[in-house]
Image: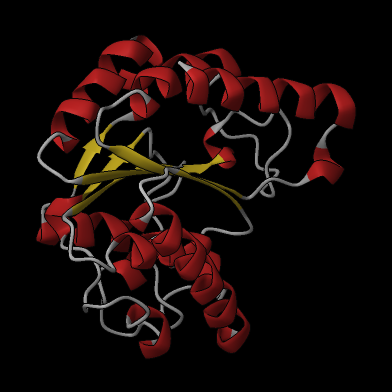
Amino acid sequence: MSDAVHRAAGAVADVVGDALAGGNASLVLGGDCTVELGTVAGALRDERSVGLIYIDHDVDLNTPETSDGALDWTGVAHLLDLPGTEAELSGLGPRRPMLAPADILYFAADNISAAEAETMRSLDLERIALAKVKEDPIGAARDAVAWGARYDRLLIHLDVDVLSFTDFPIAENVRRCDGLSFDALSTALVPLVAAPNWRALTVTEVNPDHAPDERETFGLLIAMLSKALSA
């Protein structure tokens, strides 16, 4: 399984690396959250500083040994090269670890296990809480942009399971989480992508089979991305 993930992430790294080297931004459509490993690896290829805003209901700090083994729960753990991660995935980029804890900002994460909470505490990982994003999506996004201003390249990871499934059922995970509304995410995404140093948006965990009306649901999703990317 990790071989297939490594090949896919490596292919993403090649495309993103070439795009950024040519002065272009990237929109990456996944795939599960391990696709982000490729986006980050590609962004690091010419030694620019990279920061990552991680929009996700989860924090993805599990390792194959501490979870059910599904690699899409382990993306950030691999970026940080935590003990127990797969060496071929943690070593995908030109340096290892690919990112330091200070290079990652969680945005609207709320589903955090006790073990993950301890990892966040010990590594001093930063988070803009779900409640804050719900209360003031634009203000939360501006705080995130300010956090990322020190980097040459600001990347945004968007796992659609950050959306409340009952409000917008499109995520791979069908839990009825009390996540963001579609409107709140749409509102926050515009200033995030408008950051002067923004370079890549990676969208993951979309499952069209869960949409009650695929045409309508994807129309809304595409409109949200188009609005953010054209602002």
Q: Position of residue 224 (x, y in %)?
A: 60, 21
Q: Picture quarter containing residue 174?
A: top right
Percent position of residue 14, x then y:
47, 70
The residue depicted at 81 percent of the width and 42 percent of the height is: 208
Give the quadrant of the C terminus: top left
Q: Is residue 113 visible?
A: no
Looking at the image, which is closer to me, 9 or 213? 9
**Residue 155 in sight in this render:** yes
Classify residue 11 as left or right of residue 49.
Answer: right
Q: Residue at x 48, y 73 (%)?
A: 67
Q: Is residue 87 above or below residue 184?
A: below
- Is 186 located above or below residue 128 in the figure? above
Tell me the residue at 52%/62% (across/down): 35
Q: Is residue 73 left or right of residue 80?
A: right
Q: Position of residue 126 (x, y in %)?
A: 18, 43
Q: Is residue 131 above or below residue 214?
A: above
